[in-house]
Image (tube, rainbow, N blue to C red):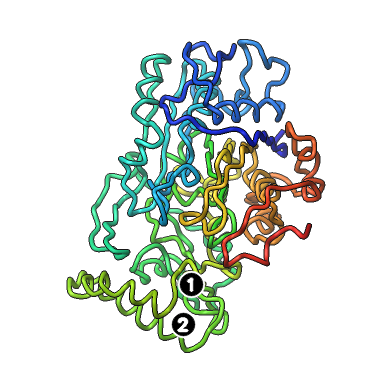
Amino acid sequence: MGNRVGIFHDETAGYTDIAPFHPPERFPEIPFDDKTDPANGGYRGVRECFRVMGLDSERFGTPEWNPLGEVVRPGDTVLLKPNLISDRQDNSDAWHGLTTHGSVIRAVADYVVLALKGEGRIILADGCQEDSPIERIRAHIGVDELQAFYRERCGIELAFLDLRDKYRVKQSGVYVDTVELEGDPRGNARCDLGSESWLTEKDGQGKKYYGSFYDIEETNRHHSGGVHEYMISRSALEADVFICLPKFKTHKKVGVTLSLKNLVGINGQKNWLPHYALGSPDDNGDQFDAGGARTKLENKFVLGAKKRMLEKNRFFIALGRMTKGLAYRIFGSTDQVVRSGNWHGNDTCWRMTLDLNRILLYADPQGNLTDTRKRYFSVIDGIIGMEGNGPLSGDERPSGVVIAGFDPVAVDSVGATIMGLDWRRFSLLRRAFDEAPHRVAGTGPESVEVRSNDDAWSGSLEQLGEAPHLGFRPHFGWVGFVERKR
């Protein structure tokens, strides 16, 4: 069943924001909750997706139905990894299209509880954007209410981990201070992929990578001289089962942010992650889509200012806060001008993303690659998605979709296709199918089997590409490059 992907679609489905997100009705397999919330479309979407996918189909509708029993066993430690990138969008206070909703988390957690049969642990963990306030995110997804519910009704502790090692204080769009955080209580594992990194194809080309912060030298120390190393949450590596709970969104650097891109949140050191190569294609970079005097002047000005701010020069920090708006007026807003690798020519970020997936799927708790593939499952929350300038500044898109499967590449290829995008046009997805000793995709694209309550969305991946779609609008740096032809 590893190549099967389930899609449930109900365009009328919505969320309830009343934690702990009780099921919409009494279900025979859920004995530990006698309360209901009919508005909980997220929960219903997850359950129906499992049904149409055919999980434990012979027992569906009975108290014995155990849809996640194929991947979760009694005694396991199960890590649930939602997308908790931020508490609000960059351009508004909206968040339903931004982060994985608590109603979807609750539904998946309930079926994990059933599969554990009273033995095991559940961890809810993510490393959100470094300048995001975790308490607001916790409140959005109902962490306190969920923890109390499972403790009182199931006798299970739902641990919540903020995997970040630091919080960046941002004012007026400029980082002004750094607060150290505890991070993963199990620590992090350093993993050097070396020649198995997708970035090795770019070795020796003189690239200068930019990570998540002003310290460019730190990023490049970990990606040079044949070394490509990452610092990965040991809780993620030690977990027996990893369940990915991403959102249904477009993305400025890799095109779509679904299961594969969701792994950025398992990093203990985000600045070790190459997001783009400085410069334009004219000088072997992918930061800009074209070179010229403007981009060279911009880099001279901006990178110089960031270096000064990295030195904690208070004058330059204050100057940066005052002049960032002026810089946008001179060089153009990031929501209108291609910069920071936010376009289809970004040849760096997808490679980093696939590196992270290779590590998660095959590395042991010490960060060494093995021949054993981790038990994995993905459930995409597409009840409300995001189109346009994702992952932080796009437009909410009610979609009524939940997608699930055992293979992140199959799940994401299906997700991109029903968005109305051509998965073959994304390096992230096309190259994930590459044959390799530690292949990220479990099967080839020809083996993907799709099952849905919508007959038009059932069949092969190729057939799905001929079916009606949701018509998502890509990020403006990807418009005209990734849309399906029909």
449 vs 334, left or right, is right
Amino acid type, label 2: Thr
Task: Name the element at disc 2.
Answer: helix
First of labels 1, 2 by sequence position: 2
In the rendered image, the vertical position of residue 285 relative to residue 138, given as above or below: below
Q: Which dot marks residue 114?
A: none
- Where is mark 1, residue-wise? 339
Label 1 secondary element: loop
Quarter of the image that includes the C terminus: bottom right
**Residue at left offset 45%, top offset 71%:** 209
CB under 8 Å between callouts 1 and 2?
yes
Can you give x and y, in whole percent of width and height, for residue 418 in the image?
69, 47
* Residue at 38% over, 23% down: 157
Outermost residue, left side: 314
Q: Which mark is residue 295?
A: 2
- Percent of width and height locating residue 184: 35, 42
On screen, 42 above or below 26? below
At 62% from the left and 44% from the top, the residue drawn is 408
Q: Amino acid at mark 1?
A: Arg
